[in-house]
Image: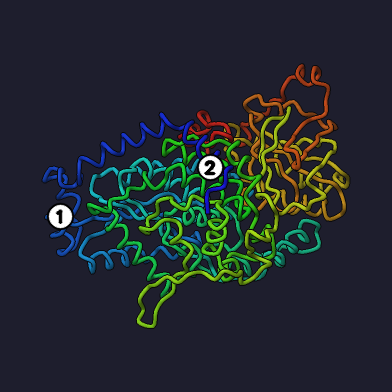
Amino acid sequence: MSLHPVVAEVTERVRERSRDTRGAYLDRIHDASVEGTHRARLSCGNLAHGFAACGTQDKAALREGHTPNIGIVTAYNDMLSAHQPYERYPTFIREVARDAGFTAQVAGGVPAMCDGVTQGRSGMELSLFSRDLIAMATAVALSHDMFDGALYLGICDKIVPGLLIGALSFGHLPGIFVPSGPMPSGISNEQKSKVRQAYAEGKANRAELLEAEAGSYHAPGTCTFYGTANSNQMLMEIMGLHLPGASFVAPDTPLRDALTAEAVRRCAALGKRGENLPIGHIIDERAIINGVIGLHATGGSTNHLLHLVAIAQAAGIALRWEDFDALSSVIPLLARVYPNGYADVNQFHEAGGMAFLIDQLLSAGLLHGDALTIAGTNLAGYTKVPTLAESGELMWTPVLKESGNRGVLRGVSEPFRADGGLRMVHGNIGRAVIKVSSVPDDRLVIEAPAVVFHDQDEIKRAFDRGELNRDFIAVVRFQGPRAIGMPELHKLTPTLAVLQDRGHRIALVTDGRMSGASGRVPAAIHVTPEADDGGPIAKIRDGDIIRLDAEHGKLDVLVDAAEFAARTPAIEDLSKHQHGMGRELFGMFRRNAMAADLGAGVL
């Protein structure tokens, strides 16, 4: 199947826009790679430090310097359920490497905060900037010139983007991302959501809410709703950095261990003469566009309008929001996974998962099938499903051509929507993004008076006072990267959903984030310029009529243009946020933060 003309056009536009920066990046990693194995050029003292703590077998191999040494960059901690299975991975990886005749070492660890724990807390103000800190820590880990390739152990939110940005700074090295898989399904996400809304209305107590939450988040593995963590896994697979079918295999199973072992062996193979394939070559314009397409086709996390832009930039590629928008018009929505449907990622995987999704998109010419991958195949190799033979050997078989559950996953001939799940909106308030994949069709256009807030907790207090039983658009500002680090505002979701369920026409406009779990309430997020940068959102007043039109991509305050231009932007005293422990350490990030449409962060 020939490539869809819009996909081809957008890719060429990105390639042309990136010609100079991509060329400079490729020159840099070429210069690094032609120098050969850096470990061989270390001084005797440097090298002795590098293998001093190793066992006899590994020490001998490293001393000779003729076999690959794989660096492990790990985001393990056992507070983060998705990362708890990584505890035993370094030992397992070293054993696989020794059996195959090479070595592996933990190169370093990176921070791994849990956004689920920090939601609504001051710690969430550190979350987005932790991506750049993770990238820096990854570069520190790889800076010792001891490694011929790297395995990246990370799953969640800012962690995978940070690891990948850091990996691309050492783009001459081969690299593979190694997932650990989702936890078993607990109570349904819909049931959990109902308890959350009941609690917001005072109809459920804290014990009942905690019971529901504990029934959902209950075991090692990734949370099973389709937020940023699982969107990360989708992206790593469709961009060719996972082994085929690896994303959603359960933790601590024979198949998961077999996939991890194969990833170790593949990483060593990718560094050999003749098959040398560094990560900086895999992540090219085709891979980036494939990632955007996967995001649209699955209704993935809006956080990736920040992260994919930053990842692309790290590879010398200039991705823009208008590229997302152009692709959205032709990419069908093929998956419905909570909060865009009733299912979780385990049900998505059982229905055919990534192999079915990729097969369908390739069949319609909606992916770059010739993109490079760590599997040694083009993307067609990712239409196969990993299984274990009776002998225990890892093998891949073609995915079925029919979905195993049409309520969760569909083919291109019968999509849930003809267009993607993400849209851009713009107007006199600025530019923003809205996730429409779970928004009812009759809520795609909302026109209502503004109610302005400078803190998400203010909305809950106004709700409790009975002030919000009406149509309105909540404007929550001074939440951007320069103001307070652009925290996610998930505390808003239950309250606004209750009001929408009561029949009110509700929407949200904010320069903050809502991640992959914004739900059914229309939310124009990532508004840029942000309020703290003097953006027009800072001029909105209570009672101004706002029109959010996701169908036509418009976001406007319906105020006379001259009057609106003459208004003085509001100013917020942000010192009240200084009580957040650790926040003062991130002053550099806040001062230098990019706008949302440039990927936020500072890299």
Drawn side of residue 338 relative to residue 310, left or right: right
- 197 w.r.t. 288: above or below: below
**Observer able to see residue 569:** yes
Amino acid found under the numbered disc labelled 2: Ala
Q: Say above or below: 73 vs 578.
A: below
Q: CA distance from mark 2 to mark 1?
A: 43 Å
Q: Residue furthest bottom?
A: 390
Instruction: Give the labeled residue for mark 2.
Output: 8
Residue 119 image position (x, y, % from top left): 61, 51
- Front residue of 479/374: it is 374
Which structural element holds mark 2? helix
Position of 336 compared to 286: left or right?
right
**Between discs 2 and 1, the one toward the N terminus:** 2
The count of marks equals 2
Q: Quadrant of residue 170?
A: top left
Q: What residue do we see at 67% from left, 49% from top?
A: 419
